Image (cartoon, rainbow, N blue to C red):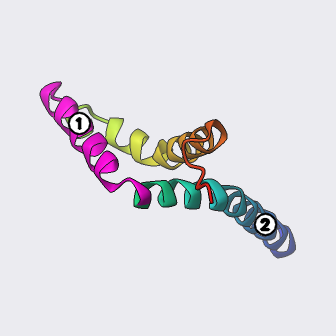
Amino acid sequence: MSLLKHRAAVRIASRQVQERRRELAEPASALLARGHQYPLTVMALAAGAGFVLGKLAVHPLKIPGLGAALSGSIADLVAKGTNLLAELGFGAAES
């Protein structure tokens, strides 16, 4: 592959990253605003999830390869969850 083809591929990838960031900016900010409105709910959900995962002894590093799989796809999961919450209206900051 020539240098020009590599450069074009990098430009395309860079544009795709910028588009994805713009797509996630609104739902993520809405979710953060919702978290600032209801901090006790956010803390209760995080504590509850941590408690349940601790009781179930779920630890990704105990299973070979699962830690890398989770760390690679966690950004996708967060993005999809944020979009879903924003579309359902849970993250909408009403004024």
Does dot 2 land on a helix, a strand or a loop?
helix
Task: Say which quadrant the N terminus sits in.
Answer: bottom right
* Classed neighbour count for the residue bearing mark 1: other residues with Cα under 10 Å, few (<14), some (14–19), many (≥20): few
How far apart in space, not on screen, are marks 1 and 2 (Cα)? 39 Å
Residue 31 horizontal side relative to residue 50, left or right? right
Which residue: 81% across, 75% down? 3
Residue 15 magenta: no
Which residue: 38% across, 53% down? 38
Residue 48: percent from the left, percent from the top? 23, 36
Of 62 and 8, which appears nearest the observer?
62
Residue 76: percent from the left, percent from the top? 55, 45
Does dot 1 land on a helix, a strand or a loop?
helix
Whether residue 58 can be seen here: no
Query: Which segment did they paint magenta?
Result: 37-59
Q: From this view, report whether residue 4 is shown above or below residue 92.
A: below
Task: Identify residue for label 2.
Answer: 15
* Residue 85, quarter of the rendered image: top right
- Which disc number belongs to residue 48? 1
Q: From this view, report whether residue 38 is shown above or below residue 73.
A: below
Q: Amino acid at mark 1?
A: Gly
The majority secondary structure of the magenta stretch comes to helix
Residue 41: percent from the left, percent from the top? 32, 46
